[in-house]
Image: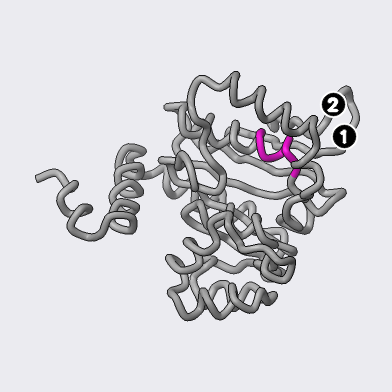
Amino acid sequence: MMESTTREHGERHPHGGVGTEVVDDHILVITVDRVEKKNAFTPKITAELEDALTRLDDDPDLFVGVLTFAGDHTTAGLEMPLFFTDEARAAASERTRAQTAEPVDPFGLGRRLTKPRITAVQGITFTIGIEIALAGDIVIAASDLRMCQLEPKRGLAPLGGATVRYVQRAGWGDAMYHLLRADEFGADEAHRIGLVQEVVEPGVQRDRAIELAREMLQCSPSALRHTIANARLALDDGEPAAIAAIPA
């Protein structure tokens, strides 16, 4: 059963929310839902996504995560003004004071999720939508995907992880080809350069992501975590460090 925070007192919350559902006892399906605004992120959505990913990481009965987005689009990006109000700053400070441990960072720039995460994307997938997807492990895209890291056209550098993830996934040339032009490209190009792993018909991406998660349930959860950890070690610290960490 979907647990949703999109609604408040029976009405849809204007700042959206993040729903969670446990599938097959061990898969946590996380859904960002603010369809009225093309799932534009708010402080509420960001905090609830942190909470959902932290729950996935901390709960020993959850083995794999699937991140999805309601409606026809992944996200149009951040609704920036909402992040700079006095109310938002106060809420963020209170949240930090109340936390007993660092939450999982959806962008993977702080605490990283240690379990597999598959992300299903569709339609408009701009800025943070790409960065959050690439902070996971596998991306399934609908064929109507529209990706754009458009921050440079707004006078900003893409500092939510794009400069790291694009290079890791696509290599320097293809990464710079898109980052330095801030152009829009589709599912076929995203697949060609390695930003997405499969392209499916629109409406199928969520189900396909869950299918892949079910395949992972056939593996040892501990083995999955150790596989991710060692591969990240190779990326971050180099091949010798990863080899040294392999048990004799």
Q: Residue at x 9, y 45 (%)?
A: 248
Residue 12 image label: 1
Q: From the viewer's perspective, tell me whether residue 12 is left or right of residue 94.
A: right
Query: Picture coordinates of residue 45 (x, y %)?
Result: 71, 39
Pointer 1: residues within 10 angstroms few (<14), some, or many (20+)?
Answer: some
| Bounds of the magenta segment | 42-47
Q: From the viewer's perspective, tell me whether residue 12 is left or right of residue 88.
A: right
Taken as a whole, is the magenta stretch helix, strand or loop?
helix
Query: Picture coordinates of residue 149 (x, y %)?
Result: 65, 67
Q: Residue at x 50, y 67 (%)?
A: 166
Q: Give the residue at mark 2.
A: 8
Helix, strand or loop at label 2? It is strand
Q: State yes or no: residue 155 in magenta.
A: no
The foreground one among 57 and 224 is 57
Establish if 25 lies above or below 202.
above
The foreground one among 153 and 170 is 153
**Residue 182 visible in the picture:** yes
Discs 2, 1 touching: Cβ within 8 Å: yes
Image quarter (top left, top right, bottom left or bottom right) of the N terminus: top right
Q: Residue at x 44, y 76 (%)?
A: 172
Helix, strand or loop at label 1? It is strand
Query: Picture coordinates of residue 5 (x, y %)?
Result: 75, 30
**Residue 201 visible in the picture:** no
